[in-house]
Amino acid sequence: MTLHRTIFIVIMFLCILTGSDVYATDILKQIHPYISVKGEYSDNLNLTNENQKKDFYTTISPGIKFSNMDAKSGVDLDASAGAVFYNDYTNLNYISANANLNAKYLTSSHFNFYLQNSYTRSDSPREREFFTTTQDNKFVLATETQRSIYWRNVVSPTVEYQFGPESRVGITYRNNVYQTAAVGAKNSMENYVSPFITYWLNRQNGISMSYAYTNGHFETSPDLNTHKVEASYMLRFTPKATASLNGGYTKQEYTVQSMNYAIYESSLGISYLFSSTLSASAQVGYYWQNPEIGRNNNGVTFKADITQKDARTTYTLSIQGGYTQDLFTAQNLGFRKYYRATGSITHFLDRQLSIGCLGSVERASGPETIFGAGANLSYLPFKWLKFSLEYKYTQTNTTYQNEATNEYKENRGMLTITATY
């Protein structure tokens, strides 16, 4: 899925969702072109232990935003392309791009349609997880140690039939394409399809079941087919509190049989809605990984999230532990024991000025631990003009002396000016 196909999908949804009742002048009022100029400095461009490259680089990004989202239908679109100019390492100059789309269409016949699309073209060694935001502060596990251009496009449509206030049956598809110019990195493509059903027997009791099939193609690694089955029983104690009993089975099958493994897992969870702006959830369980060849792995899984979103303060805190599967990235590290904690806070001092901070710590199988921290300030002197100042710090530590060459530190500062029409 290339960028021109993404643009085609956007145009198609605009035509469907606007309909004959919306005049062209109204559509034009919801289109907002903008231009952004960002100056950025890094004291370790390639995230290396020795021979760090330092440079200042500038990105000039024209873009466009469109939004007509309401309770029943609409499109949210933010797309831009950027010319990136390095001050010293001019051989790294390139064209970046970002496009994010969310669309929905809820029909009177209870058939609902959703579409997500994310496209990025970048040379950053650390890649953010797709369909996440800056506030989520979550990155894929694989980290490149060179500035090489990569692009990723993820498109995910969902069709469902709603047969109750919270009951629905549907299917989700995802196509995930990753291409990179990095030496030794691995291009890949994922095709994922998942039928699902959620059925509430009454106000207190509900069940949820899903099956997911993944076909993965890798340029230099064995291809895979994955089958995953999940089921949950949900018990709503009060309108604000819901508990769940969850179980899952995953079968990972590669074209090289010795790489195959199965994962069994079960967990207990609870979610609580403190208010319309504050929610929290927690889950704890256990997993067993049985590989075709080699030792079994097992351990405790856990995750917890708390999110606050109101007019003045937004924060999100998240922890997870147990395992992850790093697939369809630059390194395709596969199954890893994994632990991560992330958080971010943004507070508006007034309508024009906001401050924020973020932090993270993560560790996978092996000796390395990655720390991240940052702060930001945003000022909006006019509705059409915005200034943003950011600082980010990243550090990797290792407990093994012979792995010290993998350690690195990076300080990065950014000043961005954005004008919107």
Image (cartoon, rainbow, N blue to C red):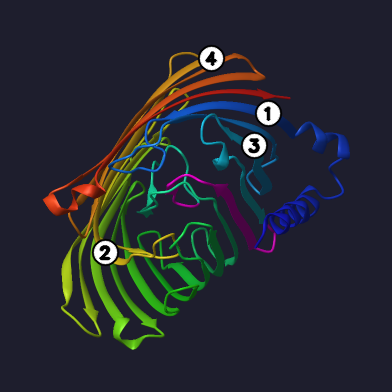
- Residue at 48%, 73% in the rendered image: 218
Q: Nearer the viewer, residue 419 or 115?
A: 419
**Three-letter amino acid code at disc 2?**
Arg
**Mark pair 2, 4: CA separation:** 44 Å
Residue indicated by mark 4 = 352
Label 3 crowding class (10 Å Cα cut-off): few <14, some 14-19, many 20+? some
Residue indicated by mark 3 = 83
The disc, 2 or 3, on the residue closer to the chain's N-terminal end is 3
**Three-letter amino acid code at disc 3?**
Ala
- Residue at 44%, 51% in the rendered image: 129
**Mark pair 3, 4: CA separation:** 29 Å
The disc, 2 or 4, on the residue closer to the chain's N-terminal end is 2
The disc, 1 or 3, on the residue closer to the chain's N-terminal end is 1
Q: Which mark is residue 35?
A: 1
Please report contact status of discs 2 and 1: CB closer than 8 Å, yes or no: no
- Residue 280 in the image, given as x and y percentages of width and height: 31, 44
245 relative position to 30: left or right? left
SS class, disc 1: strand
- Residue 102 in the image, given as x and y percentages of width and height: 61, 49
Label 2 crowding class (10 Å Cα cut-off): few <14, some 14-19, many 20+? some
- Residue at 68%, 47% in the rendered image: 74
Residue indicated by mark 2 = 336
Range covered by the magenta-colored residues = 106-130
Please report contact status of discs 1 and 4: CB closer than 8 Å, yes or no: no
**Mark pair 2, 3: CA separation:** 36 Å
**Three-letter amino acid code at disc 1?**
Ile
